[in-house]
Image (tube, coloured by chain):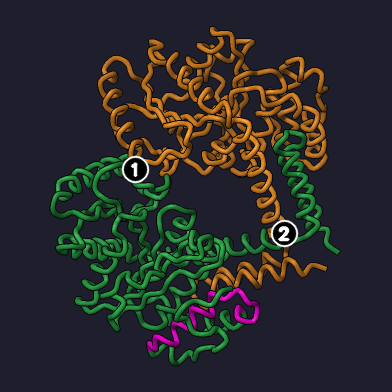
Chain colours: A orange, B green
Amino acid sequence: MAKQPDSPDADETPRVADILAGDRRALARAITLIESTRPDHRAAAETLLEELLPHAGGAVRIGISGAPGVGKSTFIEAFGLHLIEAGHTIAVLAVDPSSALSGGSILGDKTRMELLAKRPESFIRPSPAGQAAGGVARRTREAMLACEAAGFDIVLVETVGVGQSEAAVADMVDLFLLLIQPGGGDDLQGIKRGIMELAELVVVTKADGVLEAPARHTKADYEAALSLLRATSPHWKPRVLACSALNGDGIAEVWEAIVAHKAALTDVLADKRGAQARAWMWHELQDELMASLRADGRVAKQAAKLEEAVSDGKISPSAAAQKLLGVFLARD
Amino acid sequence: MAKQPDSPDADETPRVADILAGDRRALARAITLIESTRPDHRAAAETLLEELLPHAGGAVRIGISGAPGVGKSTFIEAFGLHLIEAGHTIAVLAVDPSSALSGGSILGDKTRMELLAKRPESFIRPSPAGQAAGGVARRTREAMLACEAAGFDIVLVETVGVGQSEAAVADMVDLFLLLIQPGGGDDLQGIKRGIMELAELVVVTKADGVLEAPARHTKADYEAALSLLRATSPHWKPRVLACSALNGDGIAEVWEAIVAHKAALTDVLADKRGAQARAWMWHELQDELMASLRADGRVAKQAAKLEEAVSDGKISPSAAAQKLLGVFLARD
């Protein structure tokens, strides 16, 4: 895995006490270790995580998504600065599977969130490069726990709203927030189907100047659309807000809605997080098991042939699956 | 597994030639065999399926979903009779995971679709009882292939719109149709979030009498909501129609839209079906592999302990997954 700019070497295992004391360099090192794909790093990361876990869980966990161009960085900066003014500390993590392809990173651009990045109350971490979507989300969840152990009381997990990582992020946070811009449907905004369904909060950005009226209109459209969707939780009905990162209008209301959501979930938050953690264990187990299967040379050889036969209707998917299962489990 | 009323014994393996000749009793026997969970039946079913496969694929495959009360049976009956008048033959299958719990069946009520059931051009099959959701959908896919081999040129796969089986059904059909009733959002209709996202066609039922105006209104609402969702296919934009099973208005238009969808997909249908079959193979393999894992006594024992530790934040989900993977793969 390519070493990241400004990321310390994963070989230096950070001290737990330093992380717990909020030492940002130690936290950065911990996350680099967590993101490493080297087996020895992985083992060290798991040991470290076991020690951090008892100190995790104290943050409000917020997932945030929106297509490129929606003003995500601008919103996060305004929102983060508002929270810092109110006495909070905030960590911003990113899940961006596309960066695994491009080698880039949604938070890699150093000019992004410049004011927020300068504040000692914030910690901004670009998404790890060079991993598949599942792997990125998995490590981001662990990075979130490390940030909590380091004392950050709000963790924002950012995605780009175009991939498969949104559901994974929704499964690791307390609240999923979707940013949209004034005018046009999701279709025009490039938001993938299914992402709106995850949103507990929809925020229309750029609600200022000439876009103020269109933003109001878009807000009403989404309120109508959301009313057609069944709420996933009996404790919370998704809300739509509008804000301007430029003049600050509505930014406080976004936080108020998050606080209201937290209050509404008070009695069930521990259960929600417990269920998320258990589901995460099974997902991870499933991913690892399928990875083991795909890494099996004999399975891979048979799978290629069987995929062709299945596509051509020469063998049923069930029969093909049975054959592959037999090959995998009949290891010697 | 409980024997189904009017279902022939799975022990009598039907003759392939009889199924191909359209013998309904042979087809019913084939499906009973396919649905059986007994290992020897399973083996016989797979052999049979291999022989039927070359003769499958000739039908238009339609998934149809809607909450209880939407008028699903009434719609399917009117729609089916319309298709028969137009010279088609139609098979109706059901996936209903809730019946696995209740022991009931969404198509089990003999008074449902009475007129359609009487026609020799139709074949109606209740959903199998006593299986888990994944299992039901899996066998339904195979039953669909058997119906195609028996010469039915339209296969309808019905679900109740409240469970996890809708995505599985969408993955086995050419077009997914969602029925909704006039007035109220999905919230009031009990449609689970995410199901609307699967729909290539939304049909408002009961568009007659006093409900005609509300139906028009609901149609407009869903058109607006769908315009906010990104289309999943570059070849087709979801449409909303309204119809009345009572007076027949709009029923022909539903079929016309399905024909238009089929035409739009002409060049890509084989690819879509090939991709569905391959995805199905991998899903089935994953399900079987996880079933093997869960059936492993040592894994089950550890999993119970680890789930608790994970919920309590005593171990990370990743570390727990690694432990379970180790237990499973270190078989002797």
In this rendering, position of residue A183 left or right of residue B30: left
Residue B75: where, in percent of width, then height?
A: 26, 63
Q: Label 1 crowding class (10 Å Cα cut-off): few <14, some 14-19, many 20+? A: few
Question: What is the number of the mark on residue A156?
Answer: none
Q: In front here: A42 or B317?
A: B317
Chain that bears disc 2: B
Q: In front here: A313 or A56?
A: A56
Q: In front here: A242 or A93?
A: A242
Residue A76: where, in percent of width, then height?
A: 50, 20
Quadrant location of residue B22? bottom left
Question: Which residue lies under the disc numbered 1?
Answer: B188
Q: Is residue B24 magenta?
A: yes
Question: Which residue lies under the disc numbered 2?
Answer: B293
The stretch in magenta equals B22-42
Mark 2 or mark 1, which has the lower sequence index? 1
Question: Which secondary structure type mostly characterizes the magenta part of the structure?
Answer: helix
Q: Amino acid at mark 1?
A: Leu
